[in-house]
Image: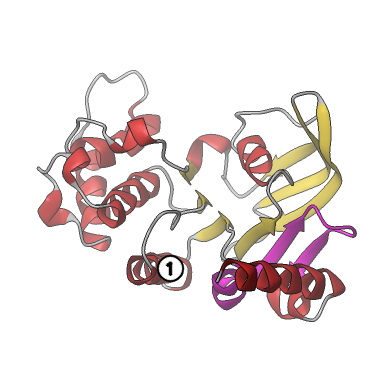
Amino acid sequence: MALLECKNVSLAYEGKTIVSDLSFSVERGDYLCIIGENGSGKTTLMKTLLGLKKPHSGEVIFSDGLSQRSIGYLPQQSTSQRDFPATVKEIVLSGCLGDCGARPFYGAREKQRAAVNMERLGIKDLSSRCYRELSGGQQQRVLLARALCATGQMLLLDEPVAGLDPKVSAEMYALIEDLSKNCKITVVMISHDIEAALKYSTHILHLGEKPLFFGKTSDYITSETAIRFIGKNERRSGENE
């Protein structure tokens, strides 16, 4: 049974339907990249999966113990969020809030989980540093560690390398790939980086083109949707040079 399944889901933004009758599933261990033009519904879909928005119609089904509360989420950051005055340890620990219940404090189990995830992402030595003092790449590692504290099953990542330079972006992709392959965490990621999406993902969900595409990355590469979309983006890249 799929870990997550969307059945005939329609999404609306400001009263306008932007996605209709969308059906796809995510199995344990998948690395799914969601791609498409701006305004095609990628972020709206992710918010729907998290329960932050309701689908206009259709349903989202979870199984195997997964729920919206047990998904790790790394959203895009705003300028004000990058200037947040808290320590790295405090931010990573906040990913454990869902497990604290009515307790007004973190226990030994949550502190251990935070320490493990900081070690895993190479930021343990930054634990006492103020978040606002970190580089963009370090901040993204902190937020990824926070997301990992919320889950052992699925990560939802919204443009996790946005604003990062190529070297740091490559390091982030390597971290995410390691979490997927070696830690067996299912990854669902929104990306405008088509090259990286094709390189790392096992599956592609393409929103905004007709027909919509969902399937294995190897099948997407040869699809008409991919040929049109990738060609269009290559032309744009040439225009910007």
Residue 205 placed where, x, y %? 72, 60
**Kind of residue at disc 1:** Tyr
Q: Which residue is mark 1?
A: 173
Image position of 23 with respect to 11: above or below: below
| Near-viewer residue (102 or 156) | 156
Rendered view: 97 above or below 26: above
Residue 171 image offset from top left, x and y in percent? 34, 69
In this rendered view, identify the residue nearer to me: 64 or 14.
Answer: 14
Residue 45 visible (yes or no):
yes
Q: Find residue 130 and report its image quarter.
A: top left
Q: Which residues are magenta?
A: 194-215
In the drawing, does residue 117 fall left or right of residue 231? left
Q: Residues within 10 Å of mark 1 (few under 14, many from 20)?
A: some
Q: Is residue 75 above or below residue 115?
A: above
Give the quadrant of the N terminus: bottom right
The residue shown at (36%, 35%) is 79
Left or right relative to 82: residue 152: right
